[in-house]
Amino acid sequence: MSLNITLMLTGYLLVMGYLGLGLLIMRRRPTRPWSPARRLAPAPARRGCPALVRQVTGTALGGYMMLVAVAVGYYHGVAHLGGRFLSSAVTGPALLVGISLPAFLLASWLATRRRR
């Protein structure tokens, strides 16, 4: 069995095992009432269009950085590919984020406007 399949299977089994363990723990312990997390900043500072743009942009950039980190780590560390492939692994998702970010901003704006 190749190293790639072994690594993928090991990661899958670990994630599924942790999820199964979490379900077992949740079944054994009775549910407690919980309170929502408090925001670090006061509520008025996090409202409006600038807050929405900051939230969506931060989410998109965080997802992009995570995708690039996984792609570079895998293809450089496991598959031993470099050079042009890694540059396309960085620029391809950047193009995807650049194209999809305006659509997500519009969809988020419409969702928050519909709630009002």
Image (spheres, grey):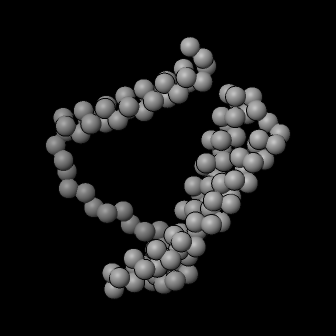
Task: Tell me if 91 is positioned left or right of 97 in this view.
Answer: right
User: Which quarter of the picture shows residue 25?
Assistant: top left
Task: Tell me if 51 is positioned left or right of 92 in this view.
Answer: left
Residue 39 to residue 21: above or below = below
Residue 50 at x, y percent in the picture: 56, 81
Tell me what residue is drawn at x 19 percent, y 50 percent.
Answer: 32
The C terminus: image quadrant:
bottom left
The residue sitting at the right extreme is: 83
Tell me what residue is drawn at x 76 percent, y 32 percent.
Answer: 81
Q: Nearer the viewer, residue 65 or 35?
A: 65
The N terminus: image quadrant:
top right
Residue 105 at x, y percent in the picture: 53, 74
Task: Tell me if 60 is positioned left or right of 78 in this view.
Answer: left
Residue 9 at x, y percent in the picture: 48, 24
**How many labels were placed on the picture?**
0
The residue sitting at the top extreme is: 1
Q: Nearer the viewer, residue 106 or 35?
A: 106
Q: Is residue 92 visible?
A: yes
Tell me what residue is drawn at x 25 percent, y 57 percent.
Answer: 34
Residue 111 to residue 74: above or below = below
Residue 75 to residue 65: above or below = above
Q: Is residue 54 visible?
A: no
Tell me what residue is drawn at x 65 percent, y 41 percent.
Answer: 71
Residue 74 at x, y percent in the picture: 65, 34
User: Which quarter of the picture shows residue 84?
Assistant: top right
Task: Tell me if 50 is positioned left or right of 94 in this view.
Answer: left
User: Which quarter of the picture shows residue 78?
Assistant: top right
